Image: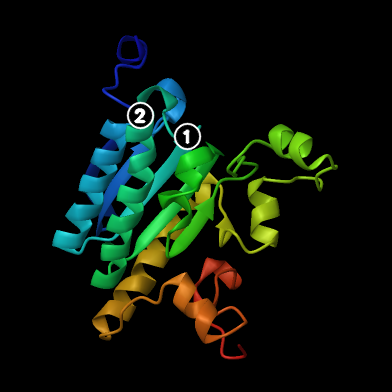
Amino acid sequence: QAESKTQLEDAVVTGFGDVNAQPVTVAVMDFRFMGGSMGSVVGEKIGRAIRDSIETRRPLIIVSQSGGARMQESILSLMQMAKTSALLGKLRKRGVPFISILTHPTTGGVTASFAMLGDLILAEPRALIGFAGPRVIQQTINAELPEGFQTAEFLEQHGQVDRVVGRHELRRILSQSLRFFTVERRAGQRPVHRDEAEEASPGPRLLRRAGGGDVVHDDSA
């Protein structure tokens, strides 16, 4: 039924191409197909996209839009969280950049796995991003939530995403970011993962909101 309504085979489309002549491997989720839920097919396709980046050393871009793991597939859907996360660990060791783009909504098991593991995490304005929904959290803790809780802007303010970017700016920001990663690789450096940067210094290693959207090193950290 979902296939006939959307003309899609599942909730993600994968492929490769370029951004301003810079080659990339891409996976794009589609909420129209069963709420963009991640089942075994979605997990396998994303896994193959990651493997392609590992083999070809093309930077990986994943655009997330999902309600989470596909409960109709039970434990098989939950296993995709571990599988995709483990493969991204291999991509990280290979030194290949991963840019994660979060759109509205990005929730559940997708948020708890690959969506938040990017070397650079971009989010669209006003996107809902989180694990459980705000009403569930509010009822669980029996307290009022902060204004704008789980929005892209709130997460940016609290360091969970690197930058909120509108679609009209996305191509430019992606191109600049890919050039930055390419320069780092040509210089013989492995892109530093966010976890390593946090371990090395309590302050931010990079400032991603300099004039014109450039990525620059923060020497004061």
Left or right: where 117 falls relative to 123? left
Q: Give x and y (percent) for residue 148.
A: 76, 45
Mark pair 1, 2: CA separation = 9 Å
Q: Name the residue carrying label 1.
A: 66
Q: Name the residue carrying label 2.
A: 11
At label 2, the amino acid type is Ala
Seen from the viewer's position, the closer of residues 219 and 110 is 110
The answer to whether residue 53 of the structure is visible from this angle is yes
Left or right: where 15 falls relative to 75? left
Q: Residue furthest front?
A: 75
Picture quarter containing residue 42?
Answer: top left
Left or right: where 26 falls relative to 163? left
Q: Give x and y (percent) for residue 125.
A: 62, 45
Mark 2 packing: few (<14 Cα in 10 Å), some, or many (20+)? many
How many numbered markers are drawn?
A: 2
At label 1, the amino acid type is Ser
**120 up-or-down from 135: above or below:** below
The residue at the point 48 percent across, 35 percent down is: 68
The residue at the point 43 percent across, 26 percent down is: 71
Q: Are marks 1 and 2 in contact (CB under 8 Å)?
A: yes
